[in-house]
């Protein structure tokens, strides 16, 4: 019998899936760098906007751009904050990432070190660069490369029930005259009475909040010596956890039940007059607008002051994928997307602080500083890069060591010294 | 006297049974009822200190927002296409494979079944990037067909395992009797095995459908174009930083997401109870 030229024996058949997978893998690993595109391009923009106003602003800016720039078309793709890291990791590995990526500075380092993000240093327009302060640019600079454009900042403020403050004779501080932590604690005591706590600390996920606020007392937590990171917990680092702890267990001016709440969980109690003050992110103002009862009067108190008002800056960013074939065009779009007017729109939509000075000024002017915008924009000056944002292994330390230890401390199960020891020992185990 | 006491004990037992069943139904149904309630509430009503089950000022705004802002209808259609195709293809492939494994016993079939079980131990995260690379080389990323292939690959081992259990439950004597009466193997399969396997096929297709309908991560990673997004991916867009959700539109969308599964179950669950083999073989 004549043998068919395509006759495949069983052993070859069994090897076929392996061969296909290997070929695919090798093809994927191959260097397929193409030159920069110069003609008309279509770029994918992965956006993480999720609030109604923010979504509308994003889509509007993209639509206007597409109408005005037929040669550089932007495809708007909406992602979501909870899964974006895995989505990016997979698409970077698979060489199929979006050209333009919305994310946050704290997460960029990992991708930048793996070479997935383009260096924007030479692409940034000069006037654009001068709009944003150097300390904010530092948060997106990895190994000397600028890997994102920071555009929205988040600061920690205190929201308060104006009627309860008035009833207790507590005066609202001006944006340029913040309360010290001592004044805050004293006022929280004044605002505490049967059925009402002065403050609700929502600390279900306490680590980032503690790391951010620790800078009020120069609490860095992370120290780099000879390329190696260590955790040290001194008086500066102990100050914030101890003050929160004492408000709950010594002054009894803070609600113990709220310690297990997520950031928006205390809102029903806040609106119902159960808590007079609510420390939280500046974006909580949006929930006030949308969800507060019509007769509810609220105010935004400026960020609290220790030895300074410093907090950690973790701006939202726009980056360009290293694999993008049209980086120059992508930067053109970003420059337009983040011009002062658009940045102000985006900040307003997300109830966050714009990084651009002109955008901040526009925002204060257009809102007349109401709804806490004066406090929000002023808080930009207090945001600096924190050491924990640069420490390799921070995420692991946070989830395995810090969060459980802080939860135990805030539940009054361990002392401040035990907390300090746990955090330091955990740092030795986890940090690189 | 004794009879009346027995009757009242019976009545009491029956009442207790119904009460327990009622409590269980409330326990199971409450999340769905609460979801329905939230979907008709205004934002202000959602954060009241003492929430009510019945909305005070019912509104359809959440549904309007969900459908206009995110094109949920198209996402639901995408999910329906992908989940139905995945279920059909999974059953189509699993049925002959399961039958062969059970009826033609060799050492290889035992090893195969063992491997099917072992393959279930791999976390899917391990498979994402290799799968992505293979699909990309085949030009199947950002296509529904690529996603269907992934879902079939994902569901097939478990479906195979499920079905072979059902096949094993069909007495061989029935097939032998049909053969003796002159039926070919194909006729035996079509007229004897398939009807008896109906509950198994329904259970397996339900499993495959619901797995595909609910799956999030592969759909997120493989489908780039907004117009191809499936329902779980679209619903995730109502959740923002630190897990803060836009509860109203999310509840409205989630309610929509539960409906097809409920309908699918309602239509097919009757078949699950059928196919009793009682009396098929006289011992």
Image (cartoon, coloured by chain):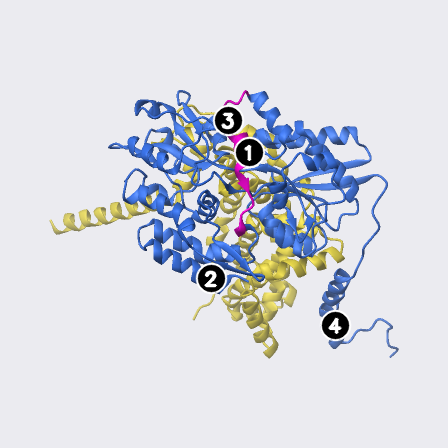
Chain colours: A blue, B yellow
Q: In the rendered image, is residue B274 in sight?
A: no
SS type, badge 3: loop
Q: In this figure, which residue is indicated by the disc labeled 4?
A: A13
- Same subunit under labels 2 and 1? no
Residues at marks 1 and 3, CA–CA distance in whole angstroms: 29 Å
Position of residue A103 in the picture relative to residue A410 (left or right): right
- Which quadrant of the figure has residue B25? top left
Q: Position of residue B164 (x, y in %)?
A: 54, 66
Residues at marks 4 and 1 touching, judged by CB atoms closer than 8 Å: no
Nearer to us of marks 2 and 1 is 1
Q: Which residues are magenta?
A: A368-388
User: Picture coordinates of residue B114 (x, y %)?
Assistant: 55, 72
In this view, A81 is above or below B86: above
**Which residue is tagged 3?**
B60
Q: Which label is found at residue A352?
A: 1
Where residue A364 appears, x then y in whole percent?
57, 24
Query: In this orientation, does residue B132 appear?
Result: yes
Depth check, front residue: A127 or A429: A127
Mark closer to the observer (2, 3): 3
> Depth-wise, is mark 2 or mark 4 nearer the camera?
4
Q: Chain of mark 3?
A: B
**Mark 2, residue position:** B277
Query: How many callouts does the rendering have?
Result: 4
Q: CA distance from mark 2 to mark 3?
A: 49 Å
Chain bearing tag 4 is A
């Amino acid at each position: 019998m004549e043998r068919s030229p395509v006759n495949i024996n069983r052993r070859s058949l069994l090897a076929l899936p392996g061969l296909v997978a290997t070929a695919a893998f090798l093809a994927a690993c191959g260097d397929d760098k193409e030159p920069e595109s110069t003609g008309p391009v279509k770029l994918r923009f992965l956006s993480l906007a999720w609030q109604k106003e923010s979504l509308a602003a994003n889509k509007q800016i993209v639509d206007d751009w597409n109408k005005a720039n037929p040669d550089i078309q932007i495809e708007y793709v909406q992602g979501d904050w909870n899964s974006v890291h895995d989505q990016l990791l997979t698409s970077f590995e698979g060489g199929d990432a979006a050209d333009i990526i919305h994310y946050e500075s704290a997460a960029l380092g990992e991708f930048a070190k793996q070479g997935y993000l383009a260096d924007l240093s030479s692409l940034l327009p000069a006037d654009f660069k001068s709009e944003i302060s150097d300390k904010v640019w530092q948060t997106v600079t990895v190994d000397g490369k600028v890997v994102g454009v920071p555009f929205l900042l988040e600061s920690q403020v205190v929201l308060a029930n104006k009627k309860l403050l008035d009833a207790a004779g507590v005066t609202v501080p001006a944006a340029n005259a913040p309360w010290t932590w001592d004044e805050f604690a004293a006022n929280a005591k004044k605002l505490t009475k049967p059925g009402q706590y002065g403050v609700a600390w929502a600390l279900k996920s306490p680590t980032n909040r503690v790391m951010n606020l620790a800078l009020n007392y120069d609490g860095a937590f992370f120290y780099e010596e000879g390329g190696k990171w260590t955790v040290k917990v001194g008086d500066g680092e102990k100050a914030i956890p101890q003050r929160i702890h004492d408000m709950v267990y010594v002054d009894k001016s803070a609600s113990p039940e709220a310690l297990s709440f997520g950031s928006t969980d205390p809102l029903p109690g806040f609106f119902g007059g159960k808590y007079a003050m609510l420390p939280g992110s500046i974006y909580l103002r949006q929930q006030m607008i949308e969800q507060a009862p019509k007769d509810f009067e609220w105010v935004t108190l400026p960020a609290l002051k220790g030895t300074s008002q410093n907090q950690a800056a973790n701006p939202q960013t726009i980056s360009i994928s290293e694999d993008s074939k049209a980086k120059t065009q992508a930067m053109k779009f970003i420059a337009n997307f983040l011009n002062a007017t658009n940045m102000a729109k985006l900040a307003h939509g997300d109830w966050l602080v714009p990084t651009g000075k002109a955008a901040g000024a526009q925002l204060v002017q257009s809102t007349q500083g109401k709804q806490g915008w004066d406090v929000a924009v002023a808080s930009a000056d207090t945001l600096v890069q924190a050491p924990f944002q640069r420490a390799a292994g921070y995420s692991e330390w946070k989830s395995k060591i810090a969060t459980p230890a802080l939860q135990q401390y805030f539940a009054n199960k361990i002392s401040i010294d035990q907390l300090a020891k746990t955090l330091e020992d955990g740092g030795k185990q986890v940090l690189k | 006297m004794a009879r009346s006491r027995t009757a009242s004990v019976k009545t009491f037992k029956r009442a207790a049974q119904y009460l327990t069943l009622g409590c269980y139904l409330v326990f199971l149904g409450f999340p769905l009822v609460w979801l329905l309630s939230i979907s008709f509430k205004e934002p202000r009503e959602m954060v009241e200190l003492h929430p009510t089950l019945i909305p005070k000022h019912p509104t359809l705004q959440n549904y309007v927002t969900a459908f206009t802002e995110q094109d949920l209808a198209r996402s639901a259609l995408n999910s329906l296409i992908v989940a139905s195709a995945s279920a059909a293809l999974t059953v189509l492939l699993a049925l002959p494979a399961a039958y062969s494994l059970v009826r033609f016993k060799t050492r290889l079939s035992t090893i195969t079944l063992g491997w099917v079980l072992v393959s279930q131990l791999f976390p899917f995260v391990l498979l994402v990037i290799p799968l992505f690379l293979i699909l990309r080389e085949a030009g199947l990323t950002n296509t529904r067909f690529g996603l269907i292939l992934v879902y079939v690959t994902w569901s097939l081992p478990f479906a195979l395992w499920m079905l072979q259990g059902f096949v094993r439950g069909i007495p061989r004597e029935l097939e032998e009797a049909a053969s003796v009466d002159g039926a070919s193997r194909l006729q035996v399969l079509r007229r004897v095995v398939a009807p008896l396997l109906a509950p198994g096929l329904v259970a397996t297709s339900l499993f495959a459908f619901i797995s595909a309908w609910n799956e999030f991560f592969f759909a997120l990673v493989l489908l780039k174009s907004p117009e191809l997004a499936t329902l779980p991916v679209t619903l995730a867009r109502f959740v923002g930083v630190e897990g803060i959700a836009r509860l109203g539109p999310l509840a409205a969308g989630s309610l929509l997401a539960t409906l097809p599964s409920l309908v699918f179950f309602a239509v097919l669950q009757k078949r699950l109870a059928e196919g009793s083999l009682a009396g098929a073989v006289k011992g």
